[in-house]
Image (tube, rainbow, N blue to C red):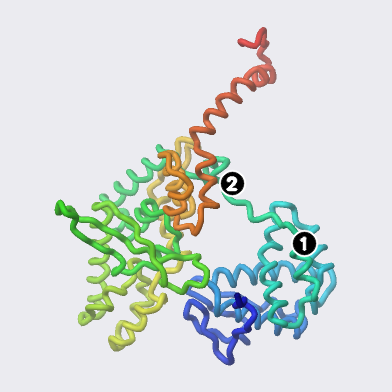
Amino acid sequence: MTNPNKSLVIGTGSITSRDGYRFEPTASHWKLSRDRTISLQWVFGVLSSTLAESLVKILTHYAIRYSADHTSNLCDRFRAFVIWVHNQKGMVDRITSSDLISYRHTLDRKNEWYLGSIRGFLKVWAELDLPGVDADVPSLFDGWRLKGNVKGWAVQTQSPTRGALTDLEYQALQEKLLEGFERDEIDLADYMLATLFCATGRRPAQLADLKGGDLIEARSSDGLREFVLNVPRRKVRGGGWRAEFKAVALTPEIGMAVRGLIAENEARLRTLRSDVRGEVLKRLPLFPAWKVIQEVFLNEGDTLSELMATDAAHLTTAVMSLRLERTVAAQSVISERTDGPIRVFPTRLRRTLATRAAREGYGPLIIAELLDHADDQNARVYTENVPEHVDAINEAMARQLAPLAQAFAGVLVRSERD
């Protein structure tokens, strides 16, 4: 099979990223998606002109083929490495095995994944025959076994601030959100944003990518309404924006509320352009960036239609996360574990959904499906750390350690029964 990385793809002049954003390779900043802009300002004074030129070519190659997040992460990790080399030796003109070995010695085991991230990057660099990487670098990486990024720590330790919510915390969160909505302290958009994070466990980028037309409504044989949300997939290798979807079933209550939000969005759009209808409405984001839309509402309908075909009218993932955190923080949901307000963020709700599924007895394959993972590798942390199992271990350890605790407290222990 031909390795797709062995053909250099950069083009000339203005380049279009995989997410459809145009950028100039010679510019110091590249906007690759609505969420990601990478800076190459740091290159000047750190890399030689030859190495800098090769870096621009390889990053352009990645920006065309891969996601903006992936390209940005590779750039960040490579920058950390070469800046370290620059601090040791001055201007960097080549990537050498000796520098990689020295850099590895500065990393502890939990940070070895820094090198793991750029391993593939530098091997592709060498395969493309771009100058700047010594010939023995790929074989050096082939001989290394690097630790991957540590995952699942917050779940494994049952962190009260970053791990899954307990049943009581989750119930309190749901009650406070509903109370806030009923008192008009939370508007429909923010209420549905928080509700969909809880119900679907999807990443912020996935919910931000949703459009009104992604809600599917049907009638079952007994006449009941059924709702399905076609959620765009992310982190799919080689997949473009909204190229793949995964259906997520919604309860009738949530489905009706989503439909209400869609109607509210359409009504607001019509206040800007009364003649908007049809396909444009279907492509209106579920969580629109209204400022962007308002900037074009005076233009012809074709301009608005073109806008709806891109991700420019969608909120950024950072805004989605911030709105969730602010919505929950305003309701002061108290944790029984910390006696303080619960901090809620999207990843924590993903962990909560998966942990609750594990408590119900679902295996890693089902949990991976719930989280929209490509495999069950990362889902196993939930089934291996079901709190009920941990409680049993904690109880057994407590019995063993109780005499020691009493001794340190100055209590005389007369027998093992004490």
Crowd class of label 2 (few under 14; some 14 to 19; many from 20; radius 10 Å): few
Tell me if residue 258 comes above or below residue 62 in the rendering.
Answer: above
Tell me if residue 228 comes above or below residue 85 in the rendering.
Answer: above
The disc at residue 1 is: none
User: Residue 262: x, y in percent?
Assistant: 26, 66
Q: Residue at x 42, y 57 (%)?
A: 202
Q: Nearer the viewer, residue 201 or 246?
A: 246
* Quarter of the image where one finds residue 272: bottom left
User: Residue 146: x, y in percent?
Assistant: 71, 57
Q: Nearer the viewer, residue 47 or 393?
A: 393
Q: Which residue has dot 2 on it?
A: 153
Tag 1: residue type? Answer: Gly
> Along the polypeptide, which appears first: circle 2 or circle 1?
1
Q: Residue at x 67, y 71 (%)?
A: 121
- Relative side of 77 to 332, left or right: right
Q: Quadrant of the N terminus?
A: bottom right
Q: Quadrant of the C terminus?
A: top right
Tag 2: residue type? Answer: Trp
Q: Which residue has dot 1 on it?
A: 143
